[in-house]
Amino acid sequence: MAYHGVEVLRQIRLDLHAGQWLGLIGPNGSGKSTLLRAAVGLVPSSGRFEMAHGRTPTPTDLSLMPQTPHLPDGMSVVEYVLLGRTAHLGWFGTESSADRQLAVAVLRRLGMASFAERTVQQLSGGEAQRVVIARALVQRAPVLLLDEPTSALDLGHQVEVLELVDELRHEEGLTVVAAMHDLSIAARYADRLALLHHGRMVAHGLPDDVLTPDLLSRVYGHPLRVHTLDGHLIVAPAPRQPVTRNSSHSG
Amino acid sequence: MVVRTDVLAQNTLEGAAERAFQLRWPAVAGAIGLLLVVGVVSVLQGAGGLAVSGVVRALVGAVPGIDVAQTLTTQQEGLFWQIRVPRTVLAAMVGASLGMAGAGYQGVFRNPLADPYLLGVSAGAGLGAVLALGFGLDLSWGPIGALPAAAFLGAVLAVTGSVLVARGSFRTPATLLLAGVAMAALFSATQTYALQRLDQDRAREVLSWLFGRLATHGWQPVILLVPYVVLAGLVLLVHARHLDVLRLGDDEARALGLRPARSRLVVVTAATLLTAAAVSVSGLIGFVGLVTPHAVRLVVGHAYRMVLPLSALVGGAFLALADIGARTLAAPEELPVGVVTAFVGAPFFCVVLWRGRRDG
């Protein structure tokens, strides 16, 4: 698929299964965000995205949690979440009581009940992320696309948000496709990983199979090691070589 | 204790969900009340020495089914029903049109400084008026006189020009805005040139129209305006939700199922036609379209489902009030109503900006 005349993504074929968490990983500029945005039609693509039976996806099939969501001035949390129902509204754009009850249920589930009338501008980073997730959930789409959902969060909030998404995935039977920059975290939550490099998919499969040191080092352009800790994969840079002033030995 | 706060939060949550994006009837009722009060004061006030009791009887007697002895003479009744009442109604309708169109433009451009004249409506209408009043250009059609027809066509032409210059693209509002600035400059310059060629009397007549004039004989301007207000009003209200979603930015709006360019096109078309119609019967009255949505937002927040209808009601009240001022402040002469709206609107706007409220 081309973007501004430059071919950005090519030869990617991904099949998703319901309830699966697919992690999109790869260096900056590898096309993870572009792939997600192309799926919801935000960038023109010559590729094909299909739901079951070859149907083209609509906002009732795919919901996108953007990387940098825009939080409008003076909009309350409830209003922001209700915007997620846009695809389901009738002609006059009026929300039914079913729409409102759904928003209430979702906000309560995410522990945001007391935040309802606060403006979205007043929320902290972690709270804002939860509100954006709430909006995506209210869309009631079976596939949740997350574009770097935790890039602005500290480690504690990262885990909190991803645990929440995982719980909701199991409760609601959602399929999750998440572009993630942290490989270890991606390995922890995703069932399958797809590694992108310069717009191509260079590996796809179980985290154990995709996260190999040679492949990763090549793709990321830096020596990387893969360790196992408490049964989880941890990807870390190779041990540092001490910087010596007069030595000309290389590591 | 924990349970109680939980329950309280629950209630607030449900209540908040009920209230979100809803029309708040107390505010609407208040605005309607305001409009009615201003309207009544407006018809009560004016030259002609009509007794208040006579006016009240005339108003009450007009309600179907109520029979009250009329005390106004036939001549006074004529003055009342053919001049005063239509003028007040016209002021309210023009104010409502400008208020709603202004809110629509602010929603499309996501800019609180947008007003309905942004894409060249005022410059185009002004040129049309100069050509009709000053040079006798006669584009009259049926009941529509030369002046309103020329003003309307000029306004529509200018905006069409802006859209064409922006390559018809409603994807980038910024480009459209700049095209509007360019078109307005072009039409404005032509208008000034044409004005200069006129003799003094003609020029003064044109200028007085340019500053806004609500004086009317009969109900014709009101009748001309009604279809525009009804149709454009309906279209704008239907798209109120679109404007709210557009506040998230084009990308997110599209991901939620909206087509931003199409929504903007529809809203701009409706708001422009509404403004052009209003301007063609009343001249260029400024600040109503700019200030009314701001004032409304201060009271009811940003949801366009509230801002649009309330901007209509409050805009109508504001202009009717300004018209009272236009008729009384410099009595026995009449001030152009655009001057009154500017004197009231500009300081208000300065205060709003100074207090640092920002709208989206």
Image (tube, coloured by chain):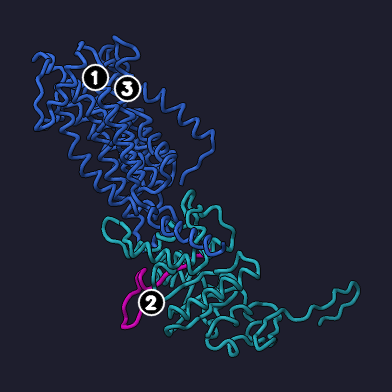
Chain colours: A cyan, B blue
Q: Do labels 1 and 2 share a chain?
A: no
Q: Is residue A55 magenta?
A: yes
> What residue sits right under mark 2 in the picture?
A49
How crowded is the residue under tag 3: few (<14 C-alpha within 10 Å), some, or many (20+)? many
Circle 2 chain: A
Identity of the residue drawn at 62% across and 80% down: A219
Above or below, comparing residue A77 to residue B140 in the picture: below
- Give residue A243's position: percent from left, percent from top: 85, 74
Residue visible at 29% across and 40% down in the picture: B272
The magenta segment is A48-67
Relative side of A134 to B266, left or right: right
Residue to which mark 3 is pinned: B337
Q: Do the residues labelled 2 and 3 touch (CB within 8 Å)?
A: no
Front-lying residue, A160 or B286: A160
Above or below, comparing residue B267 to residue B325 in the picture: below
Would you place residue B124 above or below residue B51 in this image? Answer: below
Q: In which quarter of the image is the C terminus of chain A?
A: bottom right
Q: How far apart are marks 1 and 2 (CA)?
A: 67 Å
Q: The numbered mark 1 sits on a residue in which chain? A: B
Q: Give the chain letter at badge 3.
A: B
Q: In this view, does B249 lie above or below A23?
A: above
Residue B70, given in percent of the width and then of the height, sits at: 10, 19
**SS class, disc 3:** helix
Looking at the image, residue A107 sits to the left or right of residue B163; the answer is right
Q: What element carries label 2?
A: loop
Lower sequence index among marks 1 and 3: 1
Label number found at residue B44: 1
